Image (cartoon, rainbow, N blue to C red):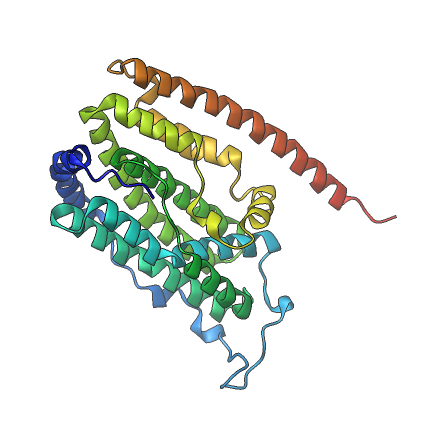
Protein backbone atom coordinates (compact mmCIF):
# COMPACT_ATOMS: atom_id res chain seq x y z
CA UNK A 1 0.00 0.00 0.00
CA UNK A 2 1.23 3.51 -0.84
CA UNK A 3 -0.17 5.93 1.70
CA UNK A 4 -0.59 9.64 1.07
CA UNK A 5 -0.10 10.80 4.67
CA UNK A 6 0.89 14.37 3.86
CA UNK A 7 -1.01 17.58 4.33
CA UNK A 8 -3.57 16.90 1.57
CA UNK A 9 -4.57 13.52 3.03
CA UNK A 10 -4.76 14.89 6.58
CA UNK A 11 -6.86 17.80 5.32
CA UNK A 12 -9.37 15.50 3.59
CA UNK A 13 -9.64 13.26 6.64
CA UNK A 14 -10.36 16.32 8.81
CA UNK A 15 -12.95 17.65 6.34
CA UNK A 16 -14.73 14.29 6.27
CA UNK A 17 -14.74 13.81 10.06
CA UNK A 18 -18.20 15.40 10.54
CA UNK A 19 -19.58 13.12 7.81
CA UNK A 20 -18.08 10.08 9.52
CA UNK A 21 -19.64 11.09 12.86
CA UNK A 22 -23.05 11.62 11.26
CA UNK A 23 -22.96 8.37 9.30
CA UNK A 24 -21.76 6.42 12.35
CA UNK A 25 -24.72 7.71 14.37
CA UNK A 26 -27.05 6.68 11.56
CA UNK A 27 -25.43 3.26 11.35
CA UNK A 28 -25.74 2.62 15.09
CA UNK A 29 -29.42 3.50 14.88
CA UNK A 30 -30.02 1.11 12.00
CA UNK A 31 -27.80 -1.84 13.00
CA UNK A 32 -29.60 -4.80 14.58
CA UNK A 33 -27.95 -7.04 17.14
CA UNK A 34 -27.72 -10.71 16.17
CA UNK A 35 -26.03 -13.76 17.65
CA UNK A 36 -23.84 -16.03 15.50
CA UNK A 37 -24.51 -19.11 17.63
CA UNK A 38 -28.22 -19.02 16.78
CA UNK A 39 -27.45 -19.83 13.13
CA UNK A 40 -25.61 -23.07 13.91
CA UNK A 41 -27.55 -26.38 13.60
CA UNK A 42 -26.12 -27.78 16.82
CA UNK A 43 -28.64 -30.64 16.98
CA UNK A 44 -27.32 -32.03 13.68
CA UNK A 45 -23.63 -31.83 14.65
CA UNK A 46 -21.51 -34.92 15.29
CA UNK A 47 -17.96 -35.34 16.55
CA UNK A 48 -15.06 -35.31 14.12
CA UNK A 49 -12.01 -37.54 14.26
CA UNK A 50 -9.21 -36.45 16.56
CA UNK A 51 -9.35 -36.22 20.36
CA UNK A 52 -13.11 -36.98 20.31
CA UNK A 53 -12.56 -40.08 18.11
CA UNK A 54 -15.52 -39.18 15.92
CA UNK A 55 -16.18 -39.65 12.23
CA UNK A 56 -13.82 -38.09 9.66
CA UNK A 57 -15.37 -35.81 7.06
CA UNK A 58 -16.38 -37.48 3.78
CA UNK A 59 -17.45 -35.67 0.58
CA UNK A 60 -20.81 -37.47 0.48
CA UNK A 61 -21.73 -35.86 3.81
CA UNK A 62 -22.08 -32.46 2.14
CA UNK A 63 -25.43 -31.61 0.63
CA UNK A 64 -24.04 -28.54 -1.12
CA UNK A 65 -23.38 -28.44 -4.88
CA UNK A 66 -19.64 -28.08 -5.63
CA UNK A 67 -19.90 -24.46 -6.83
CA UNK A 68 -21.80 -23.50 -3.68
CA UNK A 69 -19.08 -25.12 -1.57
CA UNK A 70 -16.57 -22.99 -3.48
CA UNK A 71 -18.63 -19.87 -2.78
CA UNK A 72 -18.88 -20.61 0.94
CA UNK A 73 -15.12 -21.27 1.12
CA UNK A 74 -14.26 -18.03 -0.69
CA UNK A 75 -16.71 -15.98 1.38
CA UNK A 76 -15.49 -17.45 4.67
CA UNK A 77 -11.78 -17.14 3.92
CA UNK A 78 -12.32 -13.55 2.81
CA UNK A 79 -13.94 -12.83 6.18
CA UNK A 80 -11.10 -14.64 7.96
CA UNK A 81 -8.62 -12.08 6.66
CA UNK A 82 -10.17 -9.40 8.89
CA UNK A 83 -6.93 -8.66 10.82
CA UNK A 84 -5.31 -7.41 7.61
CA UNK A 85 -8.36 -5.34 6.65
CA UNK A 86 -8.46 -3.71 10.07
CA UNK A 87 -4.78 -2.85 9.85
CA UNK A 88 -5.18 -1.38 6.37
CA UNK A 89 -8.18 0.76 7.24
CA UNK A 90 -6.90 1.89 10.63
CA UNK A 91 -3.54 2.81 9.10
CA UNK A 92 -5.18 4.76 6.32
CA UNK A 93 -8.01 6.50 8.17
CA UNK A 94 -6.63 6.65 11.72
CA UNK A 95 -7.85 5.36 15.07
CA UNK A 96 -8.90 8.64 16.68
CA UNK A 97 -12.19 10.47 16.86
CA UNK A 98 -15.13 9.45 14.70
CA UNK A 99 -12.88 7.63 12.23
CA UNK A 100 -11.52 5.37 14.97
CA UNK A 101 -14.97 4.76 16.46
CA UNK A 102 -16.28 3.65 13.07
CA UNK A 103 -13.32 1.42 12.28
CA UNK A 104 -13.58 -0.47 15.57
CA UNK A 105 -17.36 -0.84 15.24
CA UNK A 106 -16.99 -2.10 11.67
CA UNK A 107 -14.35 -4.62 12.75
CA UNK A 108 -16.51 -5.91 15.60
CA UNK A 109 -19.45 -6.47 13.27
CA UNK A 110 -17.35 -8.10 10.56
CA UNK A 111 -15.85 -10.56 13.05
CA UNK A 112 -19.27 -12.18 13.50
CA UNK A 113 -19.36 -13.27 9.88
CA UNK A 114 -16.48 -15.73 9.97
CA UNK A 115 -17.59 -17.09 13.35
CA UNK A 116 -21.13 -17.77 12.15
CA UNK A 117 -20.14 -19.19 8.76
CA UNK A 118 -17.54 -21.57 10.19
CA UNK A 119 -19.88 -22.92 12.88
CA UNK A 120 -22.66 -23.45 10.35
CA UNK A 121 -20.38 -25.25 7.89
CA UNK A 122 -18.72 -27.40 10.55
CA UNK A 123 -21.97 -28.45 12.24
CA UNK A 124 -23.63 -29.33 8.94
CA UNK A 125 -20.48 -31.08 7.60
CA UNK A 126 -20.84 -29.04 4.43
CA UNK A 127 -17.10 -28.42 3.95
CA UNK A 128 -13.95 -30.44 4.50
CA UNK A 129 -12.76 -28.94 7.82
CA UNK A 130 -9.13 -29.97 7.31
CA UNK A 131 -8.89 -28.36 3.88
CA UNK A 132 -10.67 -25.29 5.22
CA UNK A 133 -8.27 -24.84 8.12
CA UNK A 134 -5.22 -25.28 5.93
CA UNK A 135 -6.57 -22.69 3.50
CA UNK A 136 -7.31 -20.34 6.39
CA UNK A 137 -3.75 -20.61 7.65
CA UNK A 138 -2.31 -19.88 4.20
CA UNK A 139 -4.71 -17.01 3.56
CA UNK A 140 -4.20 -15.21 6.88
CA UNK A 141 -0.44 -15.77 6.77
CA UNK A 142 -0.36 -14.13 3.34
CA UNK A 143 -2.58 -11.32 4.56
CA UNK A 144 -4.02 -8.57 2.42
CA UNK A 145 -2.17 -5.47 1.30
CA UNK A 146 -4.22 -2.69 -0.24
CA UNK A 147 -2.84 -0.82 -3.24
CA UNK A 148 -5.07 2.25 -3.10
CA UNK A 149 -2.85 5.36 -3.36
CA UNK A 150 -5.05 7.96 -1.65
CA UNK A 151 -7.83 8.51 0.88
CA UNK A 152 -10.36 8.97 -1.94
CA UNK A 153 -9.21 5.71 -3.54
CA UNK A 154 -9.56 3.91 -0.22
CA UNK A 155 -13.13 5.14 0.30
CA UNK A 156 -14.07 4.24 -3.28
CA UNK A 157 -12.60 0.75 -2.96
CA UNK A 158 -14.38 -0.20 0.26
CA UNK A 159 -17.65 1.11 -1.19
CA UNK A 160 -17.43 -1.20 -4.20
CA UNK A 161 -16.08 -4.11 -2.12
CA UNK A 162 -18.86 -3.98 0.49
CA UNK A 163 -21.53 -3.96 -2.20
CA UNK A 164 -19.85 -6.89 -3.93
CA UNK A 165 -19.70 -8.72 -0.58
CA UNK A 166 -23.42 -8.19 -0.08
CA UNK A 167 -24.25 -9.75 -3.43
CA UNK A 168 -21.78 -12.63 -3.00
CA UNK A 169 -23.21 -13.67 0.39
CA UNK A 170 -26.83 -13.23 -0.66
CA UNK A 171 -26.43 -15.20 -3.89
CA UNK A 172 -24.53 -18.00 -2.13
CA UNK A 173 -27.40 -18.45 0.29
CA UNK A 174 -29.98 -18.42 -2.47
CA UNK A 175 -28.12 -21.23 -4.24
CA UNK A 176 -27.37 -23.43 -1.23
CA UNK A 177 -30.74 -25.17 -0.98
CA UNK A 178 -30.82 -24.92 2.81
CA UNK A 179 -33.20 -22.60 4.65
CA UNK A 180 -30.85 -21.96 7.56
CA UNK A 181 -27.92 -21.31 5.23
CA UNK A 182 -30.02 -18.82 3.31
CA UNK A 183 -31.08 -17.09 6.54
CA UNK A 184 -27.46 -16.84 7.72
CA UNK A 185 -26.12 -15.43 4.47
CA UNK A 186 -29.02 -12.97 4.31
CA UNK A 187 -28.15 -11.81 7.81
CA UNK A 188 -24.50 -11.30 6.83
CA UNK A 189 -25.57 -9.55 3.63
CA UNK A 190 -27.66 -7.15 5.73
CA UNK A 191 -24.53 -6.20 7.68
CA UNK A 192 -22.59 -5.73 4.47
CA UNK A 193 -25.36 -3.54 3.10
CA UNK A 194 -25.19 -1.20 6.09
CA UNK A 195 -21.42 -1.03 5.75
CA UNK A 196 -21.82 -0.22 2.06
CA UNK A 197 -24.32 2.54 2.81
CA UNK A 198 -21.85 4.12 5.24
CA UNK A 199 -19.01 4.11 2.73
CA UNK A 200 -21.20 5.02 -0.26
CA UNK A 201 -22.55 8.11 1.45
CA UNK A 202 -19.07 9.00 2.68
CA UNK A 203 -17.91 8.73 -0.93
CA UNK A 204 -20.79 11.00 -1.97
CA UNK A 205 -19.58 13.63 0.51
CA UNK A 206 -16.04 13.19 -0.80
CA UNK A 207 -17.30 13.86 -4.33
CA UNK A 208 -19.01 17.03 -3.15
CA UNK A 209 -15.78 18.24 -1.54
CA UNK A 210 -13.47 17.39 -4.42
CA UNK A 211 -15.38 16.16 -7.49
CA UNK A 212 -12.55 15.59 -9.95
CA UNK A 213 -10.28 13.86 -7.43
CA UNK A 214 -13.03 11.59 -6.10
CA UNK A 215 -14.45 10.60 -9.49
CA UNK A 216 -10.94 9.91 -10.77
CA UNK A 217 -10.33 7.69 -7.74
CA UNK A 218 -13.62 5.87 -8.34
CA UNK A 219 -12.72 5.32 -11.99
CA UNK A 220 -9.34 3.89 -10.99
CA UNK A 221 -11.01 1.52 -8.54
CA UNK A 222 -13.77 0.39 -10.91
CA UNK A 223 -11.46 -0.16 -13.88
CA UNK A 224 -8.86 -2.06 -11.85
CA UNK A 225 -11.13 -3.70 -9.29
CA UNK A 226 -10.09 -6.97 -7.73
CA UNK A 227 -11.95 -8.69 -4.91
CA UNK A 228 -10.15 -8.80 -1.57
CA UNK A 229 -10.67 -12.58 -1.72
CA UNK A 230 -8.33 -12.81 -4.73
CA UNK A 231 -5.44 -13.57 -2.31
CA UNK A 232 -7.05 -16.92 -1.37
CA UNK A 233 -5.11 -19.93 -2.73
CA UNK A 234 -6.88 -21.31 -5.80
CA UNK A 235 -9.16 -18.28 -6.04
CA UNK A 236 -9.26 -18.07 -9.84
CA UNK A 237 -10.41 -21.66 -10.29
CA UNK A 238 -13.07 -21.33 -7.61
CA UNK A 239 -14.21 -17.98 -9.00
CA UNK A 240 -14.69 -19.53 -12.44
CA UNK A 241 -16.87 -22.30 -11.01
CA UNK A 242 -18.82 -19.76 -8.94
CA UNK A 243 -19.38 -17.66 -12.06
CA UNK A 244 -20.42 -20.66 -14.14
CA UNK A 245 -23.06 -21.47 -11.51
CA UNK A 246 -24.42 -17.91 -11.73
CA UNK A 247 -23.60 -17.08 -8.11
CA UNK A 248 -21.27 -14.17 -8.86
CA UNK A 249 -20.00 -13.27 -12.31
CA UNK A 250 -19.09 -10.25 -14.41
CA UNK A 251 -22.72 -9.61 -15.30
CA UNK A 252 -23.75 -9.53 -11.65
CA UNK A 253 -20.81 -7.29 -10.83
CA UNK A 254 -21.84 -4.85 -13.55
CA UNK A 255 -25.62 -4.95 -13.09
CA UNK A 256 -25.95 -5.38 -9.32
CA UNK A 257 -22.86 -3.57 -8.05
CA UNK A 258 -21.49 -0.94 -10.43
CA UNK A 259 -24.62 0.39 -12.15
CA UNK A 260 -26.67 0.93 -8.95
CA UNK A 261 -23.68 2.63 -7.30
CA UNK A 262 -23.09 4.93 -10.27
CA UNK A 263 -26.78 5.84 -10.43
CA UNK A 264 -26.98 6.69 -6.75
CA UNK A 265 -23.86 8.85 -6.93
CA UNK A 266 -25.08 10.44 -10.21
CA UNK A 267 -21.65 9.87 -11.69
CA UNK A 268 -22.75 9.78 -15.33
CA UNK A 269 -24.99 12.89 -15.07
CA UNK A 270 -22.94 15.24 -12.87
CA UNK A 271 -22.34 18.78 -14.11
CA UNK A 272 -19.62 19.79 -11.63
CA UNK A 273 -16.69 17.92 -13.18
CA UNK A 274 -13.65 19.49 -14.75
CA UNK A 275 -11.56 18.00 -17.57
CA UNK A 276 -9.93 15.43 -15.27
CA UNK A 277 -13.26 14.28 -13.89
CA UNK A 278 -14.77 14.12 -17.38
CA UNK A 279 -11.92 11.91 -18.55
CA UNK A 280 -12.43 9.65 -15.53
CA UNK A 281 -16.14 9.39 -16.28
CA UNK A 282 -15.38 8.45 -19.87
CA UNK A 283 -13.10 5.68 -18.59
CA UNK A 284 -15.94 4.36 -16.46
CA UNK A 285 -18.29 4.34 -19.45
CA UNK A 286 -15.81 2.45 -21.62
CA UNK A 287 -15.20 -0.05 -18.82
CA UNK A 288 -18.92 -0.71 -18.45
CA UNK A 289 -19.14 -1.46 -22.17
CA UNK A 290 -16.13 -3.76 -21.91
CA UNK A 291 -17.67 -5.59 -18.94
CA UNK A 292 -20.93 -6.09 -20.83
CA UNK A 293 -19.07 -7.65 -23.76
CA UNK A 294 -17.03 -9.94 -21.54
CA UNK A 295 -20.06 -10.92 -19.44
CA UNK A 296 -22.01 -11.95 -22.56
CA UNK A 297 -19.03 -13.89 -23.92
CA UNK A 298 -18.60 -15.86 -20.70
CA UNK A 299 -22.35 -16.41 -20.41
CA UNK A 300 -22.40 -18.06 -23.86
CA UNK A 301 -19.41 -20.20 -22.90
CA UNK A 302 -21.03 -21.37 -19.66
CA UNK A 303 -24.28 -22.19 -21.44
CA UNK A 304 -22.41 -24.33 -23.97
CA UNK A 305 -20.55 -26.16 -21.22
CA UNK A 306 -23.76 -26.80 -19.32
CA UNK A 307 -25.39 -28.15 -22.46
CA UNK A 308 -22.47 -30.52 -23.02
CA UNK A 309 -22.61 -31.81 -19.44
CA UNK A 310 -26.39 -32.24 -19.69
CA UNK A 311 -26.18 -34.58 -22.68
CA UNK A 312 -26.79 -38.25 -21.89
CA UNK A 313 -23.77 -40.52 -22.15
CA UNK A 314 -23.66 -42.59 -25.41
Find residue 174 and report its horizontal and vertical position in percent. 49, 49
- Asked if residue 28 can be seen in this view, the reply is no
From the viewer's side, name the closer residue of 169 and 237.
Answer: 237
> Residue at 45% of width from left, 40% of height from top?
226
Find residue 41 and report its horizontal and vertical position in percent. 44, 69
Number of numbered discs overlaid on the protein picture: 0
> Residue at 22% of width from left, 30% of height from top?
206
| Above/below status of 84 relative to 306 | below
From the viewer's side, name the closer residue of 199 and 15.
Answer: 15
Is 165 placed left or right of 125 in the picture?
left
Find residue 140 and report its horizontal and vertical position in percent. 41, 60
| Above/below status of 230 relative to 205 | below
> Residue at 27% of width from left, 21% of height from top?
212
| Above/below status of 216 relative to 306 | above
> Residue at 22% of width from left, 51% of height from top?
103
Find residue 280 and report its horizontal and vertical position in percent. 36, 21
- Asked if residue 115 can be seen in this view, the reply is yes
Instruction: Report the quarter where the N terminus lies.
Output: top left
Determine the residue located farthest toward the right in the rendered image.
314
| Above/below status of 173 relative to 2 | below
Is 209 placed left or right of 80 in the picture?
left
Amino acid sequence: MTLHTGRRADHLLAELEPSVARLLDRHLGAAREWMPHTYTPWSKATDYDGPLDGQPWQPEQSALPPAVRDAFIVNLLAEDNLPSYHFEIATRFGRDGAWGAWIHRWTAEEARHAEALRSYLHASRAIDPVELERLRMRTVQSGYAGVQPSIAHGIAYVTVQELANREAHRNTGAACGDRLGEQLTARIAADENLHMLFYRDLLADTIELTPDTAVTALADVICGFQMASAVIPGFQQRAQRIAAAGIYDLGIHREQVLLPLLRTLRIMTRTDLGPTGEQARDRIGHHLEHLATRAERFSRLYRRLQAVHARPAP
